[in-house]
Amino acid sequence: MRKLLNTLYVTTPGSYLSKDGENIVIKVENQERFRIPVHNIEGIICFGFLGASPALMAMCAERNVALSFLSENGYFLGRVSGRVSGNVLLRRKQYRLADDPIFSSEISRIFIAGKISNCKTVLQRALRDHADDASSASIEAAINTLSVKQKQALKCVDNNVLRGIEGEAAYNYFGVFDHLIIAQKEGFYFKGRNRRPPLDNVNALLSFVYTLLTHEVRSALESVGIDPCVGFLHTDRPGRQSLALDMMEEFRPYLADRLVLTLINRKQVDAKGFVSREAGGIIMNDDTKKDLLVAWQKRKQEEIMHPFLQVMVPIGLLPYCQALLLARFIRGDINSYPVFINK
């Protein structure tokens, strides 16, 4: 476990990051706009940035401050990291297990079954809150389908089949997602998941928050010495954070989807804050990104009883808790990986 420190989000267009002594300095049009001591943060995420000095990147790598670069709509571009650290014995065992189809299938079905369970919880909450709504029958049917898919996932022994089960579950879940949006329907409607680029406001929000979640999960895996690029369900690909994508599945519904629904239904975001690009796709303006990031940080500070550890932890520490448990499972200290399930 490590202390949850702040993450610095750079969203202002034309920002340039540089180093001044032990400080991170942000300039816009060569004018200093912000500075912070490097020891006060653990991560920097830059959206549509102008650039960063080599000295700043070297300092971040040396101090183990994760420095990630993303496009304006939240598409991951790259990451600066320092020397490889962590338990080499743990990583070597991880690599061996990743080549074992039986183990890969075992851990993959746990990830996906956990994700489906948390998707069900999102729908069940909506059903309880809006039991008299005309869409309740469709939501209940989706919940029943997800229950079947969850059981299928737990019995699956082939990752190719498991991917099909996960796809069918996602299709049913997102098939009723629009019913969960009960405010601002003219500006926020959902007709299906799309990305790269997102084609509507809801998908723009989802893609942006999923990118933030990927950053958190990757940092959590690295903090315990696990290689975030060697996964069990997502296949290896140069530059792909396969294990981070594996483990973030269990968090998508609880951390990302619920946040997006809350922002829309409580009118904390407005359709005017979204811009259609000439090349296609939707992006958020700077103010909307800032509002979302403030909500994301507040959400991470809320506390929850961890279902396996049975201790109160900040929501922002959930990826780190799960990374620790995954490391213990890989080492053989526990018999199974206790996936995060929210009830």
Image: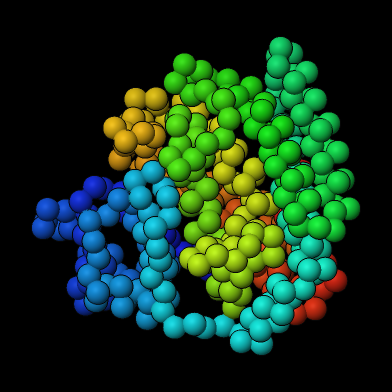
Q: Nearer the viewer, residue 218 or 340?
A: 218
In the picture, the quarter occupied by the C terminus is: top right
Residue drawn at x 77%, y 51% is: 162
Q: Is residue 336 above or below residue 128?
A: below
Residue found at the very far left of the displayed protein: 30
Q: Is residue 14 left or right of residue 150?
A: left
Q: Is residue 21 above or below residue 234?
A: below
Residue 170 x, y percent position in the rendering: 68, 39
Instruction: Give the colour scheme shown.
Output: rainbow
Q: Nearer the viewer, residue 302 or 47?
A: 47
Residue drawn at x 52%, y 83% is: 85
In the picture, the quarter occupied by the N terminus is: bottom right
Residue 63 x, y percent position in the rendering: 39, 78
Residue found at the very far bottom of the displayed protein: 89
Q: Is residue 34 left or right of residue 125?
A: left
Q: Is residue 295 visible?
A: no
Q: Is residue 73 left or right of residue 230?
A: left
Q: Is residue 71 above or below residue 234?
A: above
Res 177 → quadrant:
top right
Residue 43 x, y percent position in the rendering: 41, 64
Q: Is residue 139 visible?
A: yes
Q: How many marks?
A: 0
Residue 259 x, y percent position in the rendering: 55, 39
Res 144 → quadrant:
top right
Residue drawn at x 76%, y 66% is: 104
Q: Is residue 89 above or below residue 109?
A: below
Residue drawn at x 16%, y 53% is: 28
Q: Is residue 293 left or right of residue 308?
A: left
